[in-house]
Amino acid sequence: MRRFRFGAVVREAGSGKAWAEKARRLEGAGFEVLLVPDHLVGPRFAPIAALTAAACATTRLRVGTLVFANDFRHPAVLAKEAATLDLLSDGRLEVGIGTGWMAGDYAGAGLTLEPPGVRVGRLREALAVLKGLWGEGAFSFRGEHYRIDGLEQSPKPVQRPWPPLVIGGGGPRMLRLAAEEADVVNLGMRVKGDGSGPDPRDGGGAAFLGKIAAVREAAGKRYERLELGTSVVQVGERKAEEAWSAADSSALDETPQVLLGTRQDIADKLRHWRDEHDVSYFVVHHERDLAAFTPVIEELATPRRP
């Protein structure tokens, strides 16, 4: 049986002390992973500095991104930063990575938002570069988007052969890439090609189950080694969507991304998705839901009575 894991996305704090306190509270509440997003706009810390501070403030809490935008950094730069952070955190880093997608990030920074196929192809090459630079010896690579000439980086990550790679996606190309290359697949809604937000036509339970089936088929024999997860955008009682967030829960009631009801209701729903569909890693998307979700972690940690 797959083991439950719980993470939370935390975006900012008013000071270094307040940020450290948030990390320690998560650790004490039973969450295993603190995650930060990677956007150039909106109320969000930059990932590397924030994760380093969170790791230094805790002893067991894993840290990671949901997710690095590949278009914002050359993979050789990210490989160096991630290896350093994995060392400084004593091997507690999870590297979430995606193509980059939010139109506001690109427009505000004067970057070109290229078609999805181009971005996915570039991400596939970036993953090869990351894995190659985290390996032993000098690494070279020739691709359409990147060229590496005998580069050898130090330090290497503490976790071998590399920190867990998390790839999120909802469209066929991203799900196939995640199934083939990731250690963790975060299942979400497909994003519109123009970067304006999630595609509302991609919601519902049938679509979610279809994504699991697509990952299983594309992964083949490596499926049993994969960890399947998703982001939870509503917990307990339904709340209005945050104005700054791209999350849209309106079509997700039949999925594990919306968890309404009592502590017991939610725990039972999570057991169902783990036991019947292999989804075992749940990430609370909004800090406002942490208080409602923490008792669920306690419930699932308590053995069920016969």
Image (cartoon, rainbow, N blue to C red):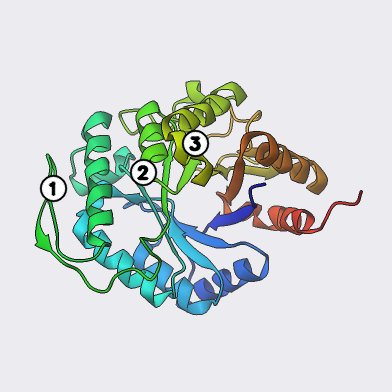
Q: Is residue 244 visible?
A: no
Residue 181 numbered tag: 2
State the SS at label 1. loop
Q: Nearer the viewer, mark 2 or mark 3?
A: 2
Q: Residues within 10 Å of mark 3 (few under 14, many from 20)?
A: many
State the SS at label 2. helix
The alpha-carbon separation of the residues under discs 1 and 2 comes to 18 Å
Q: Residue at coordinates 34% horizontally, 40% vertically from top-left? A: 102
Q: Residue at coordinates 25% horizontally, 66% vertically from top-left? A: 80
**Looking at numbered disc 2 in the image, what kind of residue is underneath it?**
Glu
Measured from the top left, where is residue 295 in percent x and y?
Answer: 76, 57
**Looking at numbered disc 1 in the image, what kind of residue is underneath it?**
Tyr
Q: Earlier in the sequence, mark 1 or mark 2?
A: 1
Q: Nearer the viewer, mark 1 or mark 2?
A: 2
CB within 8 Å, label 2 to label 3: no
Image-quadrant location for residue 301:
bottom right
**Looking at numbered disc 3 in the image, what kind of residue is underneath it?**
Gly
Q: Is residue 306 left or right of residue 246?
A: right
Residue 33 numbered tag: none
Pick the front one: 29 or 21: 29
The alpha-carbon separation of the residues under discs 2 and 3 comes to 17 Å
Which residue is labeled 3 in the image? 188
Q: Is residue 29 left or right of residue 231?
A: right
The alpha-carbon separation of the residues under discs 1 and 3 comes to 28 Å
Measured from the top left, where is residue 278 in percent x and y?
Answer: 61, 39
Q: Residue at coordinates 44% horizontally, 75% vertically from top-left? A: 90
88 relative to 280, above or below: below
Measured from the top left, where is residue 195 in percent x and y?
Answer: 33, 34
Which residue is labeled 1 in the image? 146
